[in-house]
Amino acid sequence: MRTIAIIFSFTLLAIAGTPAQAQSGGQQSLGASLGVQVFPAAGQNASQQSQDEAACYEWAVGNSGSDPFQLQQQQAANAEQAAAAEQQASQAGKGSGARGAVRGAAAGAVIGEVADDDAGKGAAYGAAVGVVAGRRRGKQAEQQAQQQVQQQEQGQSQATEAQMTAFRNAFSACLEGKQYIAKF
């Protein structure tokens, strides 16, 4: 959920810009939308800076192998998949009590028939025990599945952040070569 909130916030910032930009009607630069602060050290005007940022964007994509806007889309898709996997794990755990009851009833009927010649009574006891055991197994399976989903999501998030850092390094290096000061 945190990943979705970050992507949503970034998208809003990219669309709306900062409050000062919204009031002044100004557009956010490409560098700023990528989280890179760019200062024209050689007195370049806004038009030249925009052209240089676009050229450096293309160069950085080629050299880092990462396109930040594609990474955002991939991260959103990964978040949707993680949410679907968590929901699937939750649904799988909910049916475990009924399956446990059936298994317990079957085992209880056999034991009841052998022990007391009363399969019905054994089935009832077995079903009760089976429900509890099935629910316990279901909860454990659900927790394990959720942990796996969270670990996978965390790994994907770290990989995406590493790709973004590589892109920002390349983007900044290009801009510094064009006499800008670039920090992220």
Image (cartoon, helix red, strand yellow):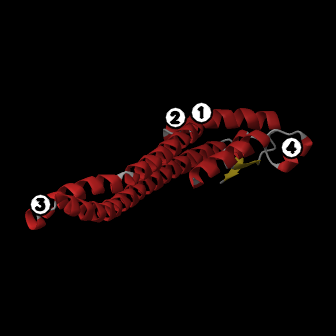
In primary-sequence order, the first of circles 2 and 4 is 4
The residues bearing labels 3 and 4 have C-alpha atoms spaced at a distance of 79 Å
> Which residue position is annotated with label 2?
62
Amino acid type assigned to the residue bearing label 4 in the image? Ala
C-beta proximity under 8 Å, tags 2 and 4:
no
User: Does residue 118 lie above or below 60 as drawn?
Assistant: below
- Is there CB contact under 8 Å for labels 3 and 4? no
- Visible in this render: residue 126? yes
Quadrant for the C terminus, please.
bottom right
Q: Which percent across, then down, holds residue 69?
A: 60, 37
- The answer to which of marks 3 and 1 sits earlier in the sequence is 1
Which residue extends farthest right?
Answer: 24
**Amino acid at dot 3:** Glu
Label located before the other in sequence (1 or 4)? 4
Q: Amino acid at mark 2?
A: Gly
Q: Amino acid at mark 1?
A: Glu
Q: Secondary structure at mark 4?
A: helix
Residue 77's place in the image compared with 132, above or below, is above
- Res 2 → quadrant: bottom right
> Who's the residue at 52% across and 46% down the image?
79
Q: Are marks 3 and 2 in contact (CB under 8 Å)?
A: no
Is residue 177 toward the left or the right of residue 75 in the image?
Answer: right
Give the residue pinned by disc 3.
113
| Label 4 sits on residue | 22
For residue 135, the mark is: none
Give the quarter of the image for residue 128. bottom left
Please report the residue visible at 17 percent of the width from the left and 59 percent of the height from the top: 119
Q: Secondary structure at mark 2?
A: helix
Q: Nearer the viewer, mark 3 or mark 4?
A: 3
